[in-house]
Amino acid sequence: MFRRSFLFAIAASALLVGGTASAGTLVTSDSGFGASSFNAINLGGGTIRFTLTGTGIVNLINGNTPPVTPIFANFDPVITLQLTVAGDDVTVSGQTPNPLTKTFTDPSGAAPITFSILGTTNSAITGTNPQGLNFSGKVLTAGTTANYDYTPLIGGLAQIAFLGSDFTGATNARQFLANTGATWTGNLTFTQINAVPEPASMALLGIGLSGLLTFRRLVRRVATA
């Protein structure tokens, strides 16, 4: 009985130490910018088509410079949003594709992340970004590479911002949304933040602590025997 409990304690402790490290750095937040740009056109009826070109760069992982670089970010090449405008508020009532996908690529491989901005609302003219649209949604799925594990982001915040002041047929975001045929060119920024501690990590922590407590009790029993 002693040997079995002792082995369980050792195994649980090893699981706690090694279980979270094998897939690389656990990512609880990221942000990026860069060469990823867009060309948008107002197709009428609240339908806006964004054609995305170039590749973004992830510049922060967990608030710090990424330990392994570069990390590139690519979005769906074409994103079509159905937007409902009410005063200053712009709500996403439809998105194609659904869900949206962003793929992170580092030297060890690629990790797709899916997210949705359906139902999110942005202030088109009176907010902090009068020349753009900034939508916040939810991370639905996330992958891993050998260097980075993005799964802690699942259920967290996914933010994508369309920024720029190069319009034709409009001079700002509000006019662009109102004028069929208007076009808009700019750049993307993005951020993702997890909502709660990763469930798997919390489970491993619980198992590890349980094992360590068991081991401590056994050592104390042997010492007093």
Image: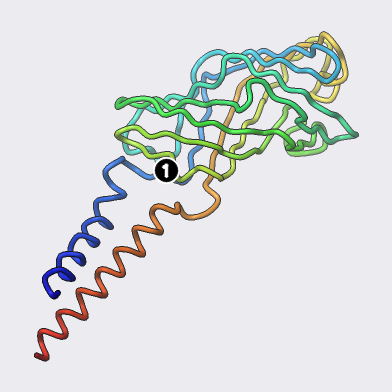
Residue 126 in the image: state x and y as whole percent: 82, 37
**Residue that appears at 62% across and 14% down:** 78
Horizontal arrangement in the rendering, residue 158 relative to residue 164 (left or right)? left
> Which residue of the protein is positioned furthest toward the front in this rendering?
1
Horizontal arrangement in the rendering, residue 94 relative to residue 53 (left or right)? right
Which corner quadrant of the image does residue 38 belong to? top right
Q: Is residue 213 above or below residue 88?
A: below
- The color scheme shown is rainbow
> Which residue of the protein is positioned furthest toward the right in this rendering?
87
Horizontal arrangement in the rendering, residue 172 relative to residue 209 (left or right)? right
Q: Which residue is more in the foreground, 62 or 200?
A: 200
Residue 159 in the image: state x and y as whole percent: 61, 36
Residue 221 in the image: state x and y as whole percent: 15, 85
**Residue that appears at 36% across and 37% down:** 148
Q: Say which quadrant the C terminus sits in.
A: bottom left
Q: Which residue in the protein does label 1 denote?
A: 27
Which corner quadrant of the image does residue 104 belong to? top left
Decide: few, some or many residues near mark 1? Use Cα within 10 Å; few <14, some 14-19, many ≥20.
Answer: many
**Residue that appears at 69% across and 24% down:** 95
Total count of labels = 1
Residue type for callout 1 = Val
Q: Say which quadrant the N terminus sits in.
A: bottom left
Judging from the image, what secondary structure is the residue with disc 1 in? loop
**Residue that appears at 67% across and 16% down:** 50
Which corner quadrant of the image does residue 81 belong to? top right
Q: Which residue is more in the foreground, 135 or 205?
A: 205
